[in-house]
Amino acid sequence: MAGTLSINVQEARGAVAVPANVDNLAVVIGVSSLGDGASPFYLSGQVAAAALGKGDAVDILTQIIEQRQEGSAVPKVPAAMYSTPTDTDGSYGTIDDTGVTGTVTVTVDALSIPLGTYEARLRCVTGGAVGTAGMKFRWSLDGGRTWSSAFALGTAETYTIPGSGVKFDFSATTDTFVAGDEVTVRTFGPTPGTTEIADAFTALAASSLDFSLVVIDCDATAAVVAAVTTGLNALAAVGKDCSAILRARIPDFENDETEAAWLAAVADIYDTLDDDRILIRASYQIITDAVTSRRYLRSDLAQFAADVVRVPRAAWPCAPADRPMPNASLVDDNGADVGHDEGPRGAATGLSDESQGNRLSCVQRLPDQARREDVFNTVPWVLYPSDSRVRNLMTRRLANAMKRVARSAATPTLGAKLFFTAPEGASTGTLTEASRKAAQAIIFQAVSSEFGDEIGNATDAALDSGLVQVKPTVAISGGNLISLDIVLAPNVGGYVLSIGLTLAIQQG
């Protein structure tokens, strides 16, 4: 149908691939330099990057796809991206030229927009005068953790690091560089705003695409969280029950924001926000990029999202019982702490502490000499209201999956089995006891079979208090459409949840 959004699943060669379990399918929302709207589902990070270009959101997508795990082979999981327009352009921080001993002055070109979050460096290898051939340089986008090969500047008076948008301008000819001179500047990638995020959710809700995770690349302000809540509601209204993963801002390194000040500011943002479908990742460390092998000091949203799709829906990714977080480090090559650690060695902790009201997802190092620098996730809390028993991502993913299974079991089979009594012209009716039992039996069989190993009461078939409870009252609409309310009450980790679900059933 013309105008209908669709997403295909493609391998590196362009062939259609078999979709993975929907519980592990993710769509990344963010800005890319080449993409526009919905992409295919990719199974190759290199192919995805070639099609979508550059950007922090593209790095998240390729990290999810490539699944580089040390010491083990992990099947790739396809992932897709919804490329949004830019709300906030990429920008530069303050250039640091204290490493220049020559006479040259180096500035950044504000007309050349950075495509991502980088620690850009330019180092002179062979000195000389600007505008005169003979000088050689190297560049880095990750703070000097990895470097390019040496290249000749020639007679140019500017230099743009390939594929980054980061451009340095040099002062007038005859000014000199000395071997070893180095300049550094932090850049910030372009991001969507609330309007762009809302439009992305609207398009995804209208599509035929099925997925269970949405990963959003922008600082999660209160306004952004509100937009995501609205978007998740739109998805749920069309039967797409999803979890959203966002990131908190990282510290303002440009202005020497302390970790304690950053922690307090971040905690304050989310203190009053409630939506147990949303996880906020409040963690930054050195992350090794799956495609380029660069080692960026950034939010670790990309690697966390990759680990979420790696594990089963009810598993806690990168917990001590799983494995350390791969491609991640809280220390630099000299052993100095560079990231936020919620463990006993952390300088400031409490973001992942529900006793303090902080329901954020972070990382920690353990007091274990055998795993001194291994990085593990704290409990991946969601932004749960005080009255919710869905308090972490594992439970949320399980609850969403149970809704999908119940809906898929009920929709094609219950139409001919539901009978009710109602006065003429009434908008509500009461199910017959036989119909109520029939509905409960069909849904119970599907849910019990699918989740028997993940819940504690898979055999509890009690009609009014068991795993699947069917409400006797139904809403009646035109066209023989009735709305049936059920409650799924799984015992998850010792706690009995109450998951409400309304099924729209066409009577046969």
Image: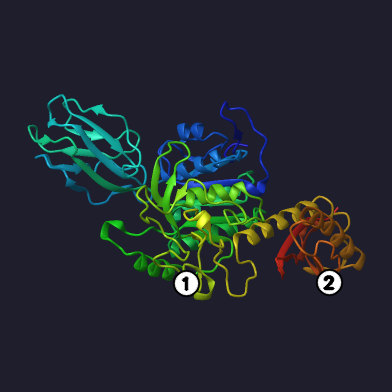
Q: Position of residue 33 (x, y in %)?
A: 40, 38
Give the x, y percent position of residue 50: 46, 31
| Quarter that holds the N terminus | top right
Q: Residue shown at 85%/62% (left/top)? A: 459
64 vs 95, left or right, is right
Q: Between 244 and 181, which is closer to the camera in this rendering?
A: 181
Residue that label 2 marks: 464
- Asked whether 75 or 27 is in front, the reply is 75
Q: Earlier in the sequence, mark 1 or mark 2?
A: 1
Q: Secondary structure at mark 2?
A: loop
Q: Nearer the viewer, residue 206 or 348?
A: 348
> Viewed as shown, does residue 401 lie left or right of 70?
right
Identify the residue at the far left of this view: 174
Q: Is residue 153 above or below residue 353?
A: above
| Residue 58 at least partly seen | yes
Around disc 2, counting alpha carbons within 10 Å, would you say few (fewer than 14), some (14 to 19), or many (20 or more)? few
Q: Mark 2 belongs to which amino acid?
A: Asp
Would you call the spot at circle 1 few (<14 residues within 10 Å), some (14-19), or many (20 or more)?
some
Q: Nearer the viewer, mark 1 or mark 2?
A: 1
Dot 1: element: loop
Residue 219 drawn at (x, y percent): 42, 57
Check disc 1 and report the residue beneath it: 271
Residue at image position (36%, 68%) is 260
